[in-house]
């Protein structure tokens, strides 16, 4: 079945643009986009305020008591107009069955290319169910590869928590795919680690192979003694050799280089019978 991708929202000659009250309109129940960006709606509202509505929305008559019309296409424009407090909006009323409405709603959003990966995956599933398509057939219809469709749909196997993180952009879909082999509880644990440690995809893949091992190694690393940060001391205690003077001169040259670099350095010398001790103290400014 074709999904009418070439359909244009042009106004047929026999169709008339009507001014419909916003109070008589309800959103599309088949809308695949579950989250609308507030910033995006505000930007569109500003455009409507400055330039007006350049393209009418598409409606169909609604069979119910709560409204007279249902949106087929143009829900963002409807929301933006509502945010501006408009009473009416320009619209074209068409006759369309549920199957076509569902398909058009999905297609309109897919063509915008800004669906989050979970909404996009659910949209593909809905298209296949509504139009009785296989993944291969759907891929041909939407101009994607079958593997692209399959990888998107696999994201729906992630836990609810991880899916929400993909929706809000906290995790990328590549992070999500790296967790697919884990049980839901482990997916949630892994997601927390990714966020806490700022893991990239490669490190996520390594961590997902052995979460407990990763945490154990991290705990050992945290218990390791930390290096001094404010004050460092170095003590050189050596017995004289036939190159004794050369060694002392080398150490003093190193001290001078440290001073020249701007570091505050103090040192003391202690000449013993069988030893020569130099204590060096380096302080950060």
Image: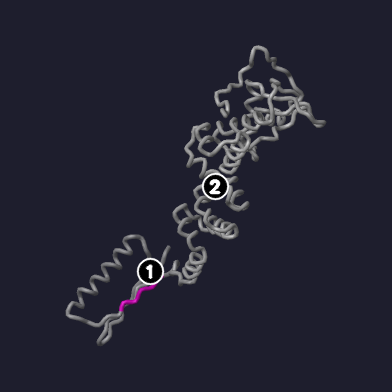
Residue 6 position by quadrant: top right
Q: In which quarter of the image is the C terminus?
A: bottom left
Q: Nearer the viewer, mark 1 or mark 2?
A: 2
* Relative image position of residue 13 (x, y in whole percent): 65, 12
User: Which is more toward the observer, 250 or 129?
Assistant: 129
Q: Quick check: 61 left or right of 51?
A: right
Residue drawn at x 59%, y 30% is 108
* Relative image position of residue 193 (x, y in whole percent): 54, 59
Residue 90 visible somewhere in the drawing: no
- Give the residue furthest to the right: 65
Residue carrying label 1: 282
- Assess whether residue 171 is covered by the magenta stretch: no
- Give the residue furthest to the bottom: 273
In the rendered structure, which segment of residues is drawn in magenta? 232-236
Q: Residues within 10 Å of mark 2 (few under 14, many from 20)?
A: some
Residue drawn at x 54%, y 49% is 171
Residue carrying label 2: 154
* Relative image position of residue 9 (x, y in whole percent): 61, 21
Give me the C-alpha separation between circle 1 and circle 2: 57 Å
For the stretch drawn in magenta, the main secondary structure is strand
User: Which sits earlier in the primary sequence, circle 1 or circle 2?
Assistant: 2
Q: Quick check: 62 left or right of 240?
A: right
The colour scheme applied to this rendered structure is: one colour
Q: In which quarter of the image is the N terminus?
A: top right
Residue drawn at x 54%, y 58% is 182
On screen, residue 34 above or below 249: above
């Amino acid at each position: 079945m074709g999904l009418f991708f070439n359909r244009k929202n042009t106004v047929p000659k026999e169709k008339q643009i009507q001014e419909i009250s916003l109070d008589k309109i309800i959103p599309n129940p088949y809308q695949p986009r579950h989250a609308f960006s507030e910033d995006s709606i505000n930007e569109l509202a500003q455009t409507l305020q400055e330039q007006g509505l350049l393209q009418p929305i598409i409606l169909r008559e609604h069979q119910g008591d709560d409204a007279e019309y249902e949106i087929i296409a143009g829900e963002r424009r409807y929301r933006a107009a509502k945010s501006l407090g408009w009473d009416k909006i320009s619209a074209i009323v068409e006759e369309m069955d549920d199957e076509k409405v569902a398909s058009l709603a999905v297609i309109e959003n897919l063509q915008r290319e800004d669906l989050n990966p979970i909404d996009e995956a659910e949209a593909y599933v809905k298209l296949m169910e509504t139009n009785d398509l296989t993944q291969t057939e759907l891929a041909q219809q939407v101009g994607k590869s079958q593997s692209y469709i399959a990888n998107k749909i696999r994201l729906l196997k992630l836990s609810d928590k991880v899916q929400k993180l993909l929706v809000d952009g906290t995790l990328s879909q590549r992070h999500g795919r790296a967790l697919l082999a884990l049980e839901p509880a482990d997916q949630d644990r892994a997601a927390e680690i990714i966020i806490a440690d700022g893991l990239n995809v490669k490190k996520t893949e390594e961590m997902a192979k052995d979460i407990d091992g990763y945490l154990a190694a991290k705990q050992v690393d945290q218990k390791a003694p930390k290096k001094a940060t404010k004050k460092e001391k170095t003590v050189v205690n050596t017995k004289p050799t036939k190159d004794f003077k050369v060694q002392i001169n080398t150490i003093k040259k190193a001290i001078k280089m440290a001073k020249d670099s701007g570091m505050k350095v103090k040192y003391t010398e202690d000449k013993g019978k069988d030893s020569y001790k130099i204590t060096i103290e380096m302080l950060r400014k």
